[in-house]
């Protein structure tokens, strides 16, 4: 009878087994667990059949959900074992850590309350780390181990479910805390002092209620200071003074799915483990003996390697199991640990390469198991709507990466795409879109991977609406009202139309038209065109009204066409490079739109730019090149422009810039386009020896940007004289022969031929 303190390691399978046996033997009438008291009201969900760890308690600031803390639990977490034990028996189970209402504050925490965590891996081995920052490390070094995790695994995790381990832990931690407090530079952090004071006050409160057999489950470091009847422990009065007048905010708590991968991170109580997948395996099989633990682990490695096309035979599994037993015996271990298993796997399975060890680490040692919570767990309406959509569209969240191919011509796939785009707009980046080959704009490829942290973002976005549609619409309007840069608005419009948000679209278009009317910056106007062109491209697929977008695009093209010649004058090289990229993007966008009036306006502008004096050579050269490709100039006209720009009276540096603008990015095109090759050849043949020598370094700089195989092919082509100067008459097309290949090209592009 009385107070029984069990110092455990967060996420320790050995601690969990031992704690289960200790509680069964103790038969407590109250269980107090290190955790957030705000979550006491949701503890009953632990007994639900639909609650499958890993899961986490999420506590967030009700006014600012981005301020949040997680308390994750795996099936092998001792706290989880204590919760299940108490709830299943109808016992009072309470959390006793310092409430997050005192910690999730808007203002920045004072330095003495929340000190930065030490990155122990970056500290030299010879450095003496304070005991309170690495208590297990001190014990490990004293016992001859390299690190605290391996030592704890040897001391507790590999010893099964021995209940006498808790007095030993208490004794060891008491010695450590005594040693730490005697150090001249020891300072107990204010936050830790408050946490421990609140734990003691919770214990005292339970005692006052009349509970006579109280089980206290806490991190091992805290266990020596929770014996409230001890003379060396602060009194109730002292603890009350420590907790007096603490600021407090309103918080909410809920359960959320978690993953084994996230268990390796620090959480609400600052705990994390390096190998949750291994610990889950150890917890599941250790009760059946060391032999079964080893055999199943090696079999899992073999299955994983075979699934990736690597050799892993049954004979190799047997050999690895025998090697593990030998290593464990030589090291005097009662049971092989992860180090021994990894050494054996490396020797047997990975003799040729270390790369598969990364696969074993990610898939098995860490793992990506995703837990689940009951649907009745309290949460925001937005979460409920999202869960309904996921169920209806058959898109269940998974922790591992999954590739999703969508054909937007199918209604179901279109709805999946819209959902993913809406979530991305909300900052819930469940899916990442990748480039797709195939049916043109009708195909999308997504890489899906659910992250537990999305729970906080969902709660945060829940303030914008009760459904995904409402929240995305309201959030898009909010972003559009805050944006003042025209390119930002056009990028946002692209996202909004992909997400099919009609109300947000009309609101955003009004903002876009107003901002574009006020802007006189030509580069800014040019940057706004490509995103709008993508909008027009997707409009047919997503059945959106593109007429208003087309009106905005028409106005932008007109204003750019008027302003571009003037904007190309007297530019620095840096500004010219920026404008050069914009010219390429606008040209591609207008080609994508494929509206004759827009194309005619743009080509007319390029004609002005190509012939106007004072234009930066990079822009003028590219203008001639684009006109040549559009057949607004023939080969002889392009050669004249090149000859005029590269005349002997011109500055060689400016000539080089012009040629660079004319040729950049044209390696393969130059090889296969006889018109372009002929223009260049004609110009080079007309150069005098002196002028050619002056131009050679500049030409070399331009051609060095081409790939080595391209340069080699160009040399062979020039050496053998495989081309000649091409005139306009050579550009005639044999329409009869061209018609024979058009059906095949249309099929490759996912287009339908019109008869």
Image (cartoon, helix red, strand yellow):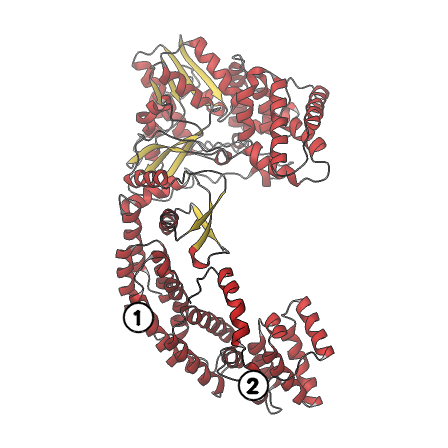
Whether residue 70 appears in this view of the structure is yes
Relative to 560, residue 634 above or below: below
Q: How crowded is the residue under tag 2: few (<14 C-alpha within 10 Å), some, or many (20+)? A: few
Residue sitting at x 33%, y 28%: 39
Quadrant where the N terminus is found in the figure: top left
Position of 256 compared to 727: left or right? Answer: left
Where is residue 639? Give x, y as percent.
58, 86
Count the numbered circles shown: 2
Where is residue 205? Give x, y as percent.
32, 18
Relative to 144, residue 304 above or below: below
Which mark is in front, 1 or 2?
2
Position of 141 compared to 401: left or right? Answer: right
Residue sitting at x 49%, y 71%: 581
Instruction: Examine the image and state in which quarter residue 111 appears.
Output: top left
Q: Pick the residue in front: 609 or 573.
A: 609
Whether residue 614 appears in this view of the structure is no
Position of 462 compared to 577: left or right? Answer: left
- In space, the residues marked 1 and 2 are separated at their CA atoms by 39 Å
Relative to 254, residue 743 above or below: below
Residue of label 2: 729
Q: Dot 1 lies on which element?
A: helix
Q: Pick the residue in front: 35 or 245.
A: 35
Image mark for residue 510: none
Where is residue 752? Give x, y as percent.
44, 62
Instruction: Examine the image and state in which quarter residue 2 appears.
Output: top left
> Going from the N terminus, do you reach mark 1 or mark 2 first?
1
Q: Dot 2 lies on which element?
A: helix
Image mark for residue 551: 1
Q: Pick the residue in front: 259 or 172.
A: 259
Relative to 257, residue 204 above or below: above
């Amino acid at each position: 009878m009385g107070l029984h303190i069990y110092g455990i390691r967060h996420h320790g399978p050995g601690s969990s087994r031992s704690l289960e046996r200790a509680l069964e033997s103790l038969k407590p009438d109250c269980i107090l667990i290190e955790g957030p008291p705000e979550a006491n009201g949701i503890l009953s969900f632990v007994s639900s059949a639909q609650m499958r760890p890993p899961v986490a308690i999420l506590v967030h600031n009700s006014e600012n959900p981005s301020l949040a803390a997680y308390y994750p639990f795996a099936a092998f977490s001792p706290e989880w074992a204590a919760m299940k034990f108490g709830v299943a028996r109808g016992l009072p189970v309470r959390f006793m850590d310092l409430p997050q209402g005192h910690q999730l504050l808007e203002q920045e925490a004072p330095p003495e309350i929340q000190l930065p965590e030490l990155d122990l891996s970056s500290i030299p081995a010879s450095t003496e780390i304070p005991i309170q920052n690495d208590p297990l490390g001190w014990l490990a070094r004293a016992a001859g181990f390299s690190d605290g995790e391996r030592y704890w695994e040897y001391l507790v995790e590999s010893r099964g479910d021995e209940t006498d381990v808790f007095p030993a832990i208490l004794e060891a931690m008491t010695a450590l805390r005594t040693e730490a407090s005697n150090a001249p530079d020891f300072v107990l952090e204010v936050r830790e002092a408050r946490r421990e004071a609140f734990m003691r006050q919770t214990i005292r409160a339970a005692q006052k209620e009349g509970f006579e057999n109280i089980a206290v489950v806490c991190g091992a470091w805290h266990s020596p200071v929770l014996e409230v009847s001890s003379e060396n422990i602060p009194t109730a009065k002292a603890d009350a003074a420590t907790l007096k007048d603490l600021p407090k905010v309103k918080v909410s708590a809920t359960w959320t799915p978690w993953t084994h991968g996230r268990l390796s991170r620090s959480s609400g109580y600052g705990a994390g483990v390096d190998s949750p997948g291994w610990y889950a395996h150890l917890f599941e099989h250790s009760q059946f003996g060391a032999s079964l633990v080893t055999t199943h682990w090696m079999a899992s490695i073999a299955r994983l390697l075979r699934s990736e096309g690597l050799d892993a035979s049954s004979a190799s599994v047997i050999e690895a199991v025998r090697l593990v037993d030998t290593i464990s015996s030589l090291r005097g271990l009662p049971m092989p640990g992860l180090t021994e298993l990894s050494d054996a796997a490396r020797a047997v399975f990975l003799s040729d390469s270390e790369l598969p060890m990364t696969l074993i680490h990610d898939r098995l040692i860490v793992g990506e198991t995703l837990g689940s919570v009951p649907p009745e767990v309290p949460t925001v309406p937005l979460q409920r709507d999202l869960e309904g959509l996921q169920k209806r569209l058959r898109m269940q969240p998974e922790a591992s990466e999954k590739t999703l191919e969508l054909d937007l011509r199918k209604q179901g796939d279109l709805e999946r795409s819209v959902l993913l785009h809406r979530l991305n707009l909300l900052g819930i980046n469940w899916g990442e879109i990748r480039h797709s080959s195939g049916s043109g704009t009708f195909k999308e490829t997504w890489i899906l991977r659910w992250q537990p942290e999305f729970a906080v973002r969902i709660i945060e976005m829940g303030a914008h609406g009760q459904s995904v549609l409402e929240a995305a619409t309201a959030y898009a309007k909010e972003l559009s009202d805050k944006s003042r840069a025209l390119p930002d608005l056009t990028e946002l419009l692209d996202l909004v139309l992909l997400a099919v948000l009609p109300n947000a679209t009309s609101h955003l278009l009004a903002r876009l038209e107003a901002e574009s009317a006020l802007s006189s910056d030509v580069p800014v106007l040019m940057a706004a065109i490509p995103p709008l062109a993508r909008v027009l491209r997707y409009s047919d697929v997503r059945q959106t009204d593109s007429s208003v977008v087309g009106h905005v695009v028409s106005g932008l093209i007109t204003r750019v066409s008027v302003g571009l010649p003037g904007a190309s004058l007297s530019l620095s090289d840096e500004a010219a490079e920026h404008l050069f990229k914009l010219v390429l993007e606008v040209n591609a966008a207008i080609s994508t739109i494929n509206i004759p009036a827009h194309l005619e306006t743009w080509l007319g502008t390029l004609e002005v730019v190509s012939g106007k004096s004072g234009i930066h050579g990079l822009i003028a050269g590219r203008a001639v090149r684009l006109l040549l490709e559009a057949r607004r100039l023939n080969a002889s006209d392009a050669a004249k422009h090149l000859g005029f720009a590269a005349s002997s009276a011109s500055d060689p540096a400016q000539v080089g810039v012009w040629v660079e603008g004319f040729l950049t990015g044209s390696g393969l095109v130059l090889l296969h386009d006889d018109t372009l090759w002929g223009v260049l050849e004609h110009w080079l043949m007309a150069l005098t020896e002196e002028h050619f020598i002056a131009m050679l370094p500049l030409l070399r700089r331009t051609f060095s940007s081409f790939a080595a195989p391209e340069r080699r092919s160009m040399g062979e082509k020039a050496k053998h004289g495989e081309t000649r100067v091409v005139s306009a008459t050579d550009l005639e097309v044999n329409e009869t022969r061209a018609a024979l290949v058009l059906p095949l090209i249309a099929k490759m592009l996912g287009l339908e031929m019109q008869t």
